[in-house]
Image (spheres, rainbow, N blue to C red):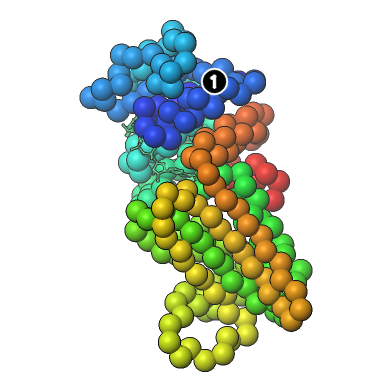
Amino acid sequence: MKIGIVGCAGRMGRMVVGEVLATPGCELAGGVEQPGSAAIGGDVAALVGAAPAGLTIGDAAAALFRISDAVIDFTAPAATAAHATLAGGHGTALVTGTTGLAADHQQAIEQAAAKCVVIQAANMSVGINLLLGLTRQVAGILGRDYDIEIVEMHHRHKVDAPSGTALALGAEAAAGRGADLDKVSQRVRDGHTGARKAGDIGFATLRGGNVVGEHSVIFAADGERIELTHKASSRAIFARGAVRAALWSQGKPPGYYTLGDVLGF
Ligand code: NAD
């Protein structure tokens, strides 16, 4: 399968280059960067210290979409919207992990999905997407006798709390119980809080060091506790999920898919 990479010189782009080169069944179709990037003119494989692949980094995204079976995109919101339009125009599968999209960017993605396969995930880790699916299932099976608490830890530079992934886990837990997270979420506890309210979903946030990301969903009842935990130690997991999604796209009809679809949840 021929995989192209837009934003190939970015932090995630380089991870994806390495992952495509290392994955059986994948052929690197090429990589592009935005006009003016210092990476233009270099060899794509050289971005990750691999032997030159004879593929020069350019800025012509349209040409890359034309020759690729799938294109992986971790760039920026406006760029991703433009890439979605190109994907739709060429019928090329698009796997995108770019975050922070405004409504018009998201609309461009959804319009493209009428014409090609689009796989979008705000967290491209296979493990996290598995955890999301399991959290919904377990919450549904265990019911309201089990108190749900979500604990996350990230590096000292993270500026938002709880993490977007922790909130997504909370939403899945709430959905599993047929509840609305906005109505049951307990995001801060301090001082004399009173007893825990039945049905609440609590969040606790830890920050420190260089932790890439750790999330636990705790189901606590009288006499037992179940914990589902994911620990990320490398950004390579996001690239691995994206390449898995690209491989999965082969032969699929046009449409909008998530990593949950790729994993069969
Ligand atoms: P980065 O800034 O290191 O890389 C982005 C790259 O895209 C840069 O090299 C930039 O030059 C390039 N780019 C921008 N506009 C372009 C265009 N029009 N054409 C071609 N290339 C273009 O950022 P990053 O850390 O790699 O993250 C990129 C995006 O992916 C962010 O939105 C980030 O939040 C998201 N991200 C998502 C996940 C996930 O799992 N979904 C994981 C990590 C990062």
Residue displayed at 62% across by 81% down:
199
Q: Position of residue 176 (x, y in %)?
A: 67, 67
Nearer the observer, 96 or 134:
134
Nearer the observer, 259 or 104:
259
Would residue 6 appear left or right of 262 to someone viewing this image? left
> As displayed, is residue 40 above or below residue 161?
above
Q: Secondary structure at mark 1?
A: helix
Mark 1, ligand 1, within 8 Å: the answer is no
Nearer the observer, 108 or 72:
72
> Quadrant location of residue 241?
top right
Q: Position of residue 68 (x, y in %)?
A: 51, 21
Toward the top, the furthest residue is 54
Observer able to see residue 85: no
The residue that disc 1 covers is 21
Query: Tag 1: residue type?
Result: Leu
Would residue 12 appear left or right of 225 to someone viewing this image? left
On-image quarter of the N terminus: top right
Q: Position of residue 37 (x, y in %)?
A: 26, 25
Toward the front, the furthest residue is 209
Residue displayed at 54% across by 74% down:
202
Nearer the observer, 35 or 149:
149
> Quadrant location of residue 40?
top left
Residue displayed at 41% across by 53% down:
209
Number of numbered discs visible in the structure rendering = 1
Would residue 202 appear left or right of 61 to someone viewing this image? right
Residue displayed at 69% across by 57% down:
134
Q: Please state the quadrant of the image where ligand 1 appears.
A: top left
